[in-house]
Image (cartoon, helix red, strand yellow):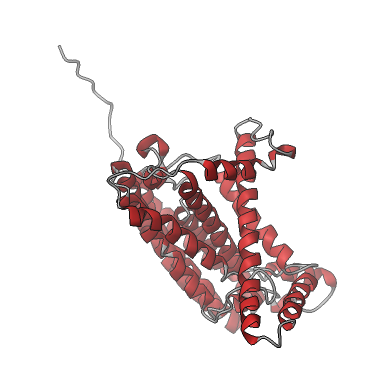
Amino acid sequence: MNNFIDYKLIELGQWTVGLFNDYPVVQILVHLLLATLPLTLAFMGAFGFSTWLERKGLARIQNRLGPNRVGIFGLLQPLADGIKMLLKEDIVPDRSDKLFHFLAPVMLMVPAFIAVGFLPLGDGLMALPMDSAILFFFAVGSLNTIAVFMAGWSSRNKYSLLGGMRAVAQMISYEIPLVLSAVAVIMFSGSLNAQEIVASQQIQSWLASGNLVKEFFGQILGWHIFKPWGFAGFIFFFVAALAEANRSPFDLPEADSEIIAGHLTEYSGFKYAIFFMAEYISAFAIAGIATTLFLGGWSGPVIAGLPWFIIKMFSLFAVMIWIRGTLPRLRVDQLMGYAWKFLLPLAILNIFVAGFYYFAEQQFGSLAAFIGGWVIGFGILQTAAKGLSRLNKSPTLDGKRVYQLVE
């Protein structure tokens, strides 16, 4: 692997910090600035580009043109929308709790930016390097529940409150299978350190030696997604992540046809823009952690590091756009039942499948575990999924419907 870009960025940062060796206090401030400012600006730029990408993608799916007036191919449309939001009036309801109405978007935005700091963007490129980075990522991400409910409750609006209650129920329900899907990866990697989890996916032992073709495919086949428990865990994780990020088809807290805009009903102007940005940053954070856990993080053939991580993260975000343009919104009972009756049992079962795979790998070798795991482990998960589907199937009416007309 060639981590040229990562090493050059690290050298540039070390050189910049070294300019202030005679000023220790300034050196600390510069170090903090280099760890936070580039990451913040990069994800804010990614937010603007992703809004354009989503609008163009949905327009393509719906046989429309999408934004094409502001700039070439409409690329400056996010900038125009941002200026429009800044110029809009900030309307606060008279009966609202003004303090919490103001704090809610801030409490949603701050954890979103902290969460992306735990992402290993490259070899050594991590704003908040910690041995328990994965644990802290999920802990910080759970704060979104408080912020969303605070927004709904403080607005003193029935639609806002209903949206906030929906969001709390949804986030708590899907956060459990989300974390359990990651437990299998943590157990197999033996670490909560994000960089060590990426390192555990780099090369399979039975493909580590040989010609370039073996090493090329070894860089890919070492990713957890190509193992039976990893593939199933990735599906469970990604579905739960869609619900955590309020993405379609789990966007019930903001269902405009039912409750106007949910917890965002009484927000306008810059506060609404902050909510909008925080949701997109959270979606990127979840796509980034899914890349780290299941897709090998920054590792990859030929040129490893930051480019690979960006490609994988945006690919997952593109799948989110595709799902939004394809699937209809679920009902509340379908959403809650899917989490507790289907996703949660399968996520727990997948942990045992991962343990079986690890035991087989230690006893019979990587190749035997790889082949046997797909046959046995994935067969167990598929059988359990079919059984749960039949068990949770909605009852159907027997016989013909009889209509009685009123005289």
Residue at image position (36%, 60%) is: 146
Q: Residue at x 84, y 74 (%)?
A: 211
Q: Find residue 400 and report its image quarter.
A: top left
Q: Residue furthest right?
A: 211
Would residue 171 be visible to someone looking at this image? Answer: no
| Residue 399 coordinates in the image, percent (x, y) | 27, 30
Q: Position of residue 351 (x, y in %)?
A: 46, 71
Residue 125 horizontal side relative to residue 174, left or right: right
Residue 36 is at least partly visible in this image:
yes
Q: Is residue 363 above or below residue 69?
A: below
Q: How many marks?
A: 0
Quarter containing the N terminus: bottom right
Residue 57 in the image, given as x and y percentages of width and height = 63, 40
Does 400 sit above or below residue 55? above
Rendered position, 13 above or below 325: below
Q: Residue furthest left?
A: 407
Task: Name the residue rendered at 76%, 75% in the picture.
Answer: 12
Q: Quadrant of residue 396?
A: top left
x, y percent for residue 283: 54, 56
Judge from the rendering whether residue 366 lies leftward or rightward of residue 353; answer left or right: right
> In this view of the protein, which residue sits in the foreground, 356 or 222?
222
Q: Quadrant of the C terminus?
A: top left
Front residue of 9/229: it is 9
In-front residue for pair 224/25? 25
Position of 241 with respect to 216 (left or right) is: left
